[in-house]
Image (cartoon, rainbow, N blue to C red):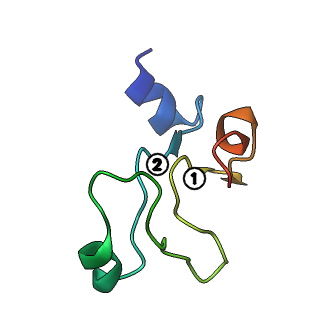
Amino acid sequence: MSISADLVSGAAEPSGLLPMQLPADMRTVEEQHEDAPHDMRCHVDADGNTYDFAFGLNWKGVINDNRTRKYRK
């Protein structure tokens, strides 16, 4: 079975980590320095999740493992 079929059938759980920061608003985009990493105020959703670099989700919720912990400030 292919990866896509595994996801559709429920045999595999989709998950992913953000490869970038998602800005809170347009002002944040305009004020950010393109050459400075992790320099912006990130979007926070209604559940309190901050969409910063390496934030991850899967069907169970927020991914909290070694991959994500090492990028927290």
Q: Earlier in the sequence, mark 1 or mark 2?
A: 2
- Which element type, helix, strand or loop, lies under badge 1? loop
Residue drawn at point x = 40 percent, y = 64 percent: 22
- Which element type, helix, strand or loop, lies under badge 2? loop
Where residue 70 appears, x then y in whole percent? 69, 39
Q: Is residue 64 above or below residue 23?
A: above
Amino acid carrying mark 1 in the image: Phe
Quadrant showing the N terminus: top left
Q: Is residue 52 above or below residue 18?
A: below
**Measured Cα–Cα span from mark 1 to mark 2:** 5 Å
- In the current view of this chain or complex, which residue is farthest to the top? 1
Query: Badges 1 and 2: C-beta atoms under 8 Å apart?
Result: yes
The residue carrying pointer 1 sits among few (fewer than 14), some (14 to 19) or many (20 or more) residues within 10 Å by Cα, namely many
Q: Nearer the viewer, residue 5 or 47?
A: 47
**Residue identifier under label 1:** 55
**Residue identifier under label 2:** 18
Q: Nearer the viewer, residue 20 or 8?
A: 20
Where residue 10 appears, x then y in whole percent? 57, 36
Q: Nearer the viewer, residue 58 or 34?
A: 34
Q: Is residue 7 left or right of residue 57?
A: left
Amino acid carrying mark 2 in the image: Leu
Q: Is residue 27 above or below residue 3?
A: below
Q: Is residue 43 above or below residue 58?
A: below
Residue drawn at point x = 56 percent, y = 78 percent: 45
Residue drawn at point x = 60 percent, y = 83 percent: 46
Where residue 14 appears, x then y in whole percent? 53, 39
Q: Is residue 60 left or right of residue 53?
A: right
Q: Is residue 31 left or right of residue 45?
A: left
Residue drawn at point x = 50 percent, y = 51 percent: 53
